[in-house]
Image: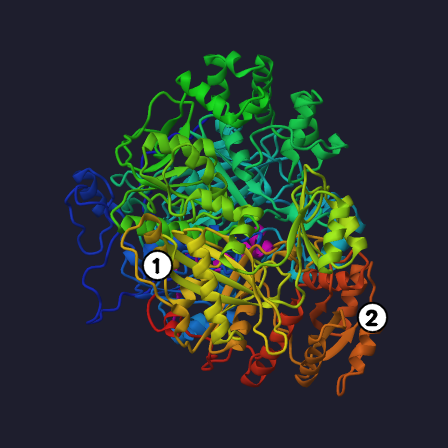
Amino acid sequence: MRLPRLQQPCLRSLTLPSSRRSFHLSRPVCSPFAPTHILRAVAAPAVGAYAPKDGENVLNSPSELARKISGKVLPKLPKPDVQRVLVVGSGGLSIGQAGEFDYSGSQALKALSEEGVEAILINPNIATWQTSHQLASEVYFLPITTDYVAYVLEKERPDGILLTFGGQSALNVGIELDRMGILDRLGVKVLGTPIRTLEVSEDRDLFVQALKEIDIPVAQSTAVSSVNAALAAAEEIGYPVILRSAFTLGGLGSGFANDPDELRDLSAKSLSLSPQVLIERSMKGWKELEYEVVRDGADNTIICCNMENFDPLGTHTGDSIVVAPSQTLPDSEYHMLRSAALKVIRHLGVVGECNIQYALNPKSREYCVIEVNARLSRSSALASKATGYPLAYTAAKIALGHTLPELPNAVTKTTTACFEPSLDYIVTKIPKWDLAKFSTQVNREVGSAMKSVGEVMAIGRTFEESLQKAIRQVDPRWKGFEVYIEPEDLDRALSRPTDMRLFAIAYAMYKKNYTVDQVHDLTKIDKWYLYKIENIVETHRAIKAAGSVDKVDHELMMRAKRMGFADSQIADLVSTTEEVVRAARKSLGITPFVKRIDTLAAEYPAHTNYLYTTYNASEHDVEFDEHGTMVLGSGVYRIGSSVEFDWCAVTCARKLRDMGKKTIMINYNPETVSTDFDEADRLYFEELGYERVMDIYELEQAQGVVVSVGGQLPQNIALRLKHAGVNVLGTDPQQIDNAEDRHKFSSVLDKIGVDQPEWTEVTSLDGAKAFANKVGYPVLIRPSYVLSGAAMNVVYEESTLEHKLSAAASVSPLHPVVITKFIDGAQEIDVDAVAHQGKLIVHAVSEHVENAGVHSGDATLVLPPYTLDASDMERLKTIAKKVAAAFEISGPFNMQIIRQPASEGQEAPLKVIECNLRASRSFPFVSKVLGHNFIETATSAIVGHEVPESIDLMEAERDYTSIKVAQFSWTRLAGADPFLGVEMASTGEVASFGKDVYEAYWASLLSTTGFKVPRAGSGVLIGGDVTQPEMTSIAKKLTNCGFKLYCSSPLVEEFLNDIPYVSAKRIVFPTKDKRKLREVFDEHDIQCVINLARSRATDFVDEDYVARRNAVDFGLPLLNNARTAELFVESLARKIPLGGLRKYEEGRIPSEVRSWREFIGHRA
């Protein structure tokens, strides 16, 4: 493994930047109120006692002499004079812009507070650690749009703004604010990379020109803004071409075109999302590499990390397997690209952190720059975690005027940050796609537009070890590099990358005996990686040949573990259980070693607590004398488990530290705050499976394990941990199992007199029909074994039931199906609560806007609830008390309850449909809205330390409402039907506050990434099921607000025109020609689509499907649920008279622009 040598910190010759890259430097203002001591990022006093004199920058070094000399030679940079800084966040998690910005923004806020600078944050993502008062003095849960950021600037009047920590959203807003002259008018300085640099790196033409000035090759490209211009450019460059959109995140709207027809369709779609697209020569099959670069205001520049894509060019780097440091570059090529990176970043004038992506021809030394991101990106989060170099923190310090030599190395604390990390391990990142959630509609091929929702990072000392660890992290059902798919057309599966291509390679090598050369010819993956994979295949065959666990000798067992084989994987190969293999391995004296990430390849002593385990070592790097409390993190971000569980894990670990306990965090997600090495006393960047958790527990001799704050993954192994003698803290894992098992759960509810919908478990189709006829349709089916598509479905008639249980899932004694009576039109309620030894301590009740039938993760949550009366609230509290007592809960739990419409003179029945004995997705939301941290209370209950008295938070009257809205990523998933059902589809969430439901919903909906409010008097396309009662009120309100109504079906046309004072026009609706449809939308100025279909479309030409899908593809707001559509239209009607559709105007600040503290009345 080739590693770049550690370079001694070098001080560059003190030439000032050329006039073309002038820095905006403010003169220091002498104010009687200026703080006398500015907090500086200088290491502990042990590091030389030489104190800097008036404005000197001093090298962070243990050598007194070095510090003295450096004070005289380092350039004196005037620091920007800022007291208050606005940090722009990235909003809800979506594909292409996810948890990495929670991490980078949190680091930036940490750096600001160290410097004594007051931070104001605007970010509607209520689930993140970043939006906590521990980091920012004021938090605004508002949309990341030019208008709202301008309102906050106007209200708060900060001196500076940071734009590079909120992804593409923040960057686009900053460029627009600058163009509008708002930053100049309010005297707000852009800190870090100047706006001009951001514009050059974003605008393709300017970027190409800038790189030509210094003779750096760029992919040959032409920027165009019409379809015809795109076709002309492609003729000149020659097919195949790649099309990229400017100013978009995660390669949205980009793709490959092999001929004019493909290009025509692609460019029409892309130009609806971005004003400018680029047509470039395609270099599919070249190597793709990335360098992370840090540069300060004095022009000191370092390469923090270089990374290589396992997949060749053609797959978006966010959808590619990535390896760091690069493994297949000879030294000359590594340095050629390194020199080019330094040259480019200096020329562009980046101040802070950025990344540069290259394409490199594997057959020659020809290379070209693909793009530069002049901001923190997903790759920078990965690079930070891969090297232990805190890029975002350093970038924020640089933005405040510090230089690299004076900043301390975060790991050694005694050396300077002006160094290039060198690694004695190898890191593999694998993306997590959740494409199976979207049934058969979504194309599984991955290309230049990103589709993954999260990623994992594994650390090992060989590529084989690192790769197999990463595979297990992506999905606990996978045990390593094994055959999980058997494609019919294998050559196609190898040559056209999909989310499962790695397993197509496994099938080719294990079952079809393909050679490395054959696989290389089809995939263009470098042979170095394929030979390493062949090592895994040969080891697999050797274990299988051994036949039984007794025949696996010390040498073979050691070889397998060094290749990253899991105990369970070995168990499958020799037909035994994981426990037997574990015992055999330990009897051979084979256990993992704990190594420390020190960024210096062990050249200097390091004191980091950033750890990983490996079998490729001979000694431990740490003493096991702390006996801490283990907190199991949430693992990879995926649909259904995201950043909200990271907030829970971080909050829990911090609370344990406050109690004076040592903490051990286990997690492997590079996008998280929990994997920051200063959040716990020890961080294991490791798998969350049974084997690894047991290894760490035994080595550390930990006091106990917390399994209830990391979502579902830790829960899945809780019972096994208990049986293995682990002290599982909080609720007994046996009770967790009782709640997860439908039969046990049901009988407990019956025993305590809590109602639930009728249900049964059937093993045949006839049994299913009999139950459905007994309780009446609709019913909800949950197969245990799913063949394709979504697992859960609401079924309205017998013919659908037959289809769902024969074609979509198998039903048999081996694969029983749970069927529940589905209550149509019922309201769904979420109860989040904490109990201690079965006694309820605190609870929150949120109601869903949508009726039951929409997954709670996709539903719109309102807190405090606005339709439930006092008796309902009291009954819900009673249910929570009964459940807490029945399951003897100590810690967090969550229930979903449905409220059936009440019949004459009766109370509305409340039925429990689900209960999880762990923290839920809505814990951060209820904690922040009610101003009471549920996880801190839960942590006290879990460990039984200083448990607070019971308190009823729901009794208090509140003069505000908050609404949580799901963030979807439909734009990314070409073909997926944007329809809400019982399977979760959202990738993130946002929430805003308001004086009432309407104001809160308005701000929340606008906070979803890419939501555009329709212009006054524009057209609205209405469609769907006319029997929905809300349809009439929606049409009336839209008409009263001055919108024009259009529809595509004669049925809807007749229905709408029968409503008094409403008129709707039926339009020609081409369902197969996207370009013609775009023209129809433009002709009628359609700017919003409301589609209230009852069920998902069955084919691609269904008019409702076409309307929903194209609303998404054309970047228009889509409302696909009757209750939320009605709420939106009502909010719109109330907002229009207050100027809701007008753009930002100086001096006007809407009433929802208030900080979190102002709404809840204290700093929560």
Find residue 219 and report its image quarter: top right
Asked if residue 188 is among those painted magenta in the image, a careful observer would answer yes
> In the orientation shown, which residue stands out farthest toward the left?
49
Asked if residue 740 is among those painted magenta in the image, a careful observer would answer no
Tell whether 24 sits left or right of 639: left
Q: Earlier in the sequence, mark 1 or mark 2?
A: 1
Near-viewer residue (713 or 873): 873
**Numbered disc 1: secondary structure:** loop
Q: Position of residue 546 (x, y in %)?
A: 57, 13
Query: Mark 1 belongs to which amino acid?
Result: Leu
Around disc 1, counting alpha carbons within 10 Å, would you say few (fewer than 14), some (14 to 19), or many (20 or more)?
Answer: many
- Picture disc at residue 1049: 2
**Numbered disc 2: secondary structure:** loop
Find residue 757 and report its image quarter: bottom right
Q: Position of residue 283 (x, y in %)?
A: 66, 39
Residue range of the region highlighted in magenta in the rendering: 187-209
Find residue 955 and report its image quarter: bottom left
Q: Could you tell me what secondary structure mostly forms the magenta stretch?
A: helix
Identify whether 555 is placed above or below 667. above
Query: Mark 2 belongs to which amino acid?
Result: Ser
